[in-house]
């Protein structure tokens, strides 16, 4: 799938999002519930800020010593019989993964939820080999069946769909004939996917946190699908972003606790699974072969910059769940598999500004994201920093904005020009308010406003003229 | 055990060090003294009985039935619970604690009453997985039990298959009260000790909190997805 999703320009995607009434209602309710649950579980702790301070310290220390902890982790994996591949980019990662699958002559692959495999378009690479790749997370399975609809949330990927749409997808693709009751829909997924779990030769997972001291990969889940994918197939491949690591099990405790509470308001999810290399001799279940693929794909260039704290992210989506902009435009508007505030920070860092220069502006800078972040990433400050970089260094601000900025700077320092400039406003705004079609649908920047309501037509006077007139004793009102 | 392979390590880690503006860190890095340790404050100083109260309260939140019993009463309780769960077929770990807590006899009695009972047996290989897949009830002990989150911690080994707590429709955990600790912290502290001793880790450590569930459809909670659809805990007051 790649980081970039969807077609069209930023404002076209936003338009689509804003006009999707079901999606907006779903997102609003989801935000309210997720945020409510999080607040409840964090408030009862009493010392949430202490937990945040500790979590931030752990993430900062780990990133500062990332080479050391990765080294320790991979040596421990190999010592216990696992294989490790460091991949610079998506192509290298996919080449290794497909080579393992080829060697195993595997056709059936079962996957548990993993953002990084989306990022590197792994499914497509495996499908090109002729493999049957099945997503087993319920939300991801729904999206896969629905002709690979992109995810709109990093924890609840099918958030934008209602149960009737899901029922229709199951009916059209899998001859489902029951109701839209989520219990029945989930039961159907259980029946359908059981045989996929049992027949898969290779299981592929993401990784919430790797533990350096023991060479363990941990998975934080609720449905049991990740356990299936790591219990039944003979070969396991785990794909992880290079920053998903903790020094010891003691720090794992803290970050897992923060992730569960911040993501879904649970004290712990139903399953926290720590997997260390292959099964032991004499074990019946678990993989005989274990591979870890550690992916850079643009992360290392964030290290050592003013954006380094973005790598502290533990992918809980707490920032997404409080964002007023996400609430209205939905996940697909961001054009990235990473939406919301963290997506607006991370996407331009991973993919460059060219396709994503609007994202740092898709924020009100209200700082709700920063307050919500369990590892204290200063998200809104990083968005401001992006804007600074865009305007000052990359020259990627839109032509209109540059012209307007330059024009304003010149005019503001030249009173006579400023006077002429502002007195030309009424006729210009009058044109805009009536719109290009003369019926109140304005162009460009005011379109979002005029879509909903008419701009007031100017009265024909500027404040300056009115003021001068008033001083002369001729002012009305 | 054969050692695994590692590809591209040096180049990859050198790039990280370069970005961080320093040389590769190969000398042991000491963990800093963290400014705060809030995890040890949770349920600090609570007795086992008080921890049990917290545990039982939490189980309500995670849709899990809890039965608290004594070892003497267990023999009577056990068939009732199995019956409530629908009987039929059981798969359980090969674990000396079944004898220690008098459950061997209870399982034999189940067999006599027509319930299929399968003990995990490494010599039977894949047959175990088939048995687990068909079983109505999977039974394991809890190695460490977390009061705060209602969690059973399970360490895998030859007799303790991963499938037993995963594939059957219902999961039954036997929890000696002595295994109760405040929270995840005490469990991970112990695992940290295993790792420090530099021995082989259990290949799979599971923290299980109730039945499988999902909220992927309209954020409505569905209990029972790919793992067990129902979870029951029996706490044995052993000390």
Image (spheres, helix red, strand yellow):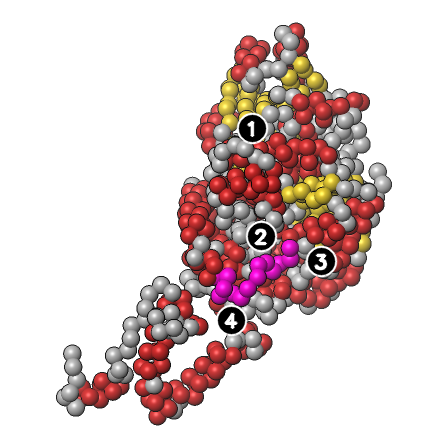
Query: Are labels 1 and 4 on one chain?
Result: no
Q: Is residue A424 or residue A48 the one in the foreground? A: A424
Name the residue beneath numbered marker 2.
A150
Within 10 Å of disc 3 (Cα), the crowding (few <14, some 14-19, many 20+) is: some
- Decide if residue B33 is in sight here: no
Q: Seen in the image, is A109 located left or right of residue B7?
A: left
Q: Which residue is mark 1?
A: B229
- Which chain is indicated by disc 4? A
Of the numbered discs 3 and 2, the one sitting upstream in the chain is 3
The residue located at (57%, 35%) in the rendering is: A176
For label 4, the residue is A387
Give the mark nearest the N terminus, 3 or 4: 3
Cα–Cα gap, marks 2 and 4 = 27 Å
Check the picture and name the quadrant holding the C terminus of chain B.
top right
Q: Residues within 10 Å of mark 2 (few under 14, many from 20)?
A: many
* Pointer 2 chain: A
- Dot 3 falls on a residue whose secondary structure is helix
Q: Tell which tag, 3 or 2, sits nearer the viewer.
A: 2
Point out the stretch of residues depicted in magenta: A1-14
Front one among A131 and B91: A131
């Amino acid at each position: 799938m790649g980081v970039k999703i969807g077609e069209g320009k930023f404002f076209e995607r936003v338009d689509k999002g804003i006009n999707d009434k079901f999606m907006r209602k779903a997102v609003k309710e989801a935000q309210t519930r997720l945020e409510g649950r999080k607040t409840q579980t964090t408030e009862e702790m009493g010392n949430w800020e202490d937990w945040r301070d500790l979590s931030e310290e752990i993430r900062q220390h780990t990133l500062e010593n990332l080479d050391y902890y990765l080294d320790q982790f991979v040596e421990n994996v190999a010592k216990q019989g696992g294989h490790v591949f460091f991949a610079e980019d998506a192509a290298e990662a996919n080449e290794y993964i497909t080579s393992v699958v080829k060697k195993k002559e595997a056709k059936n692959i079962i996957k548990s939820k993993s953002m990084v495999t989306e990022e590197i378009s792994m499914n497509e690479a495996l499908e090109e080999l002729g493999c049957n790749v099945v997503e087993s997370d319920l939300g991801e399975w729904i999206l896969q069946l629905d002709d690979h609809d992109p995810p709109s949330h990093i924890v609840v990927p099918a958030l934008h769909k209602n149960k009737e749409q899901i029922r229709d997808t199951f009916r059209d693709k899998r001859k489902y004939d029951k109701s839209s009751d989520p219990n029945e829909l989930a039961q159907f997924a259980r029946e359908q996917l059981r045989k996929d779990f049992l027949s898969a030769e290779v299981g592929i997972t993401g990784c919430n946190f790797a533990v350096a001291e023991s060479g363990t990969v941990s998975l934080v889940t609720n449905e049991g699908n990740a356990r299936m994918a790591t219990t039944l197939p003979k070969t396991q491949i785990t794909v992880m972003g290079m920053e998903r690591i903790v020094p010891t099990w003691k720090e794992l405790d803290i970050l897992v606790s923060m992730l569960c509470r911040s993501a879904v308001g649970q004290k712990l999810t139903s399953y926290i699974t720590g997997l260390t290399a292959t099964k032991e001799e004499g074990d019946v279940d678990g993989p005989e072969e274990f591979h870890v693929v550690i992916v850079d794909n643009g992360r290392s260039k964030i290290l050592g910059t003013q954006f380094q704290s973005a790598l502290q992210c533990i992918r809980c989506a707490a920032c997404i769940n409080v964002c007023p902009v996400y609430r209205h435009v939905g996940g697909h508007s961001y054009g990235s598999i990473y939406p919301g505030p963290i997506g607006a920070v991370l996407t331009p860092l991973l993919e460059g500004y060219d396709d994503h220069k609007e994202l740092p502006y898709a924020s009100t800078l209200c700082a709700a994201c920063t307050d919500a972040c369990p590892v204290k990433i200063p998200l809104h400050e990083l968005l401001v920093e992006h804007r600074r970089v865009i305007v000052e260094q990359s020259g990627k601000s839109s032509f209109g904005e540059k012209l307007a900025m330059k024009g304003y700077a010149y005019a503001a320092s030249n009173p006579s020009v400023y006077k002429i400039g502002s007195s030309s406003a009424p006729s210009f705004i009058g044109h805009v308010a009536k719109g290009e079609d003369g019926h109140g649908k304005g162009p460009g920047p005011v379109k979002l406003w005029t879509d909903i309501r008419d701009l007031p037509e100017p009265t024909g006077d500027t404040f300056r003229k009115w003021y001068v007139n008033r001083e002369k004793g001729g002012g009305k009102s | 055990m054969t050692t695994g392979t590692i590809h591209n390590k040096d180049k990859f880690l050198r790039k990280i060090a370069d970005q961080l503006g320093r040389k590769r860190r190969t000398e042991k890095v000491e963990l800093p003294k963290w400014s705060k340790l809030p995890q040890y404050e949770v349920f600090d100083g609570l007795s086992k009985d008080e921890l049990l109260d917290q545990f039982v309260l939490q189980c309500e939140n995670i849709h899990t039935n809890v039965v608290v019993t004594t070892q003497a009463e267990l023999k009577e309780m056990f068939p009732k619970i199995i019956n409530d769960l629908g009987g039929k077929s059981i798969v359980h770990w090969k674990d000396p604690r079944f004898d220690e807590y008098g459950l061997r006899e209870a399982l034999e009695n189940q067999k006599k009453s027509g319930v299929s009972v399968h003990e995990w047996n490494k010599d039977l290989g894949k047959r175990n997985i088939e048995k687990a897949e068909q079983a109505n009830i999977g039974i394991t002990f809890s190695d460490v039990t977390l009061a705060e989150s209602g969690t059973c911690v399970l360490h895998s080994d030859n007799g303790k298959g991963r499938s037993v707590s995963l594939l059957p429709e219902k999961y039954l955990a036997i929890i000696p009260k002595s295994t109760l600790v405040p929270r995840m912290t005490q469990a991970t502290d112990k695992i940290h000790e295993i790792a420090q001793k530099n021995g082989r880790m259990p290949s799979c450590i599971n923290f299980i909190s109730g039945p499988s569930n999902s909220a992927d459809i309209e954020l409505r909670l569905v209990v029972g997805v790919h793992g067990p659809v129902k979870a029951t805990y029996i706490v044995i007051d052993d000390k």
